[in-house]
Image (cartoon, helix red, strand yellow):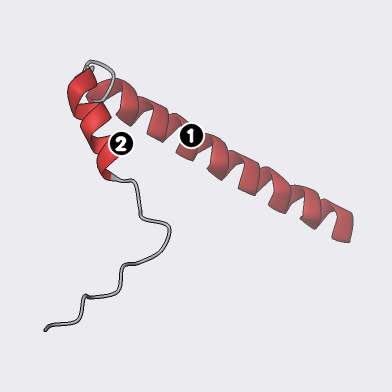
Amino acid sequence: MQVFRQDRTARHVALVLALKLCLLAGLWWAFVREHRVEPDPGQVAAAVLRQQVDPAPRSPEPIP
């Protein structure tokens, strides 16, 4: 009897996951599929180069 319950629970979990996957695929197909974004190479390069971090933080200079 216990094996039957485990198999039943596994079937229910698999069914729910399959339904979620189908729902997500349908939402993607309906709303996202047509929207293509072409990144500008200059903007990408600027964003990548701007994110470089100094290896050691600079200490403030003493005020004379």
Look at mark 1 in the image and give the residue it sits on: 21
Q: Nearer the viewer, residue 38 or 6?
A: 38
- Splitting the image into 4 quarters, where does residue 39 fall? top left
Count of numbered tags:
2
Alpha-carbon span between mark 2 and mark 1: 34 Å
State whether residue 26 is above or below residue 51. above
State whether residue 48 is above or below residue 1. above
State whether residue 31 is above or below residue 11. above
Residue 18 located left or right of residue 62: right
- Splitting the image into 4 quarters, where does residue 46 fall? top left
Q: Nearer the viewer, residue 28 or 14?
A: 28
Residue 64 located left or right of residue 29: left
The crowd level at tag 1 (other Cα within 10 Å; few <14, some 14-19, many 20+) is: few
Mark carried by residue 45: none
Residue 30 lies, in percent from the top left, at: 26, 23
Q: Quadrant of the C terminus?
A: bottom left
Q: Secondary structure at mark 1?
A: helix
Residue 6 located left or right of residue 18: right
- Kind of residue indicated by mark 2: Val
Give the residue displayed 78% in from the left and 56% down from the top: 5
State whether residue 59 is above or below residue 1. below
Residue 4 lies, in percent from the top left, at: 83, 52
Q: Quadrant of the N terminus?
A: bottom right
- Splitting the image into 4 quarters, where does residue 57 fall? bottom left
Q: Earlier in the sequence, mark 2 or mark 1?
A: 1
Residue 53 lies, in percent from the top left, at: 35, 53
Q: Nearer the viewer, residue 17 or 64?
A: 64
Tag nearer the camera, 2 or 1: 2
Q: Secondary structure at mark 2?
A: helix
Look at mark 2 in the image and give the residue it sits on: 48
Give the residue displayed 23% in from the left and 75% down from the top: 60
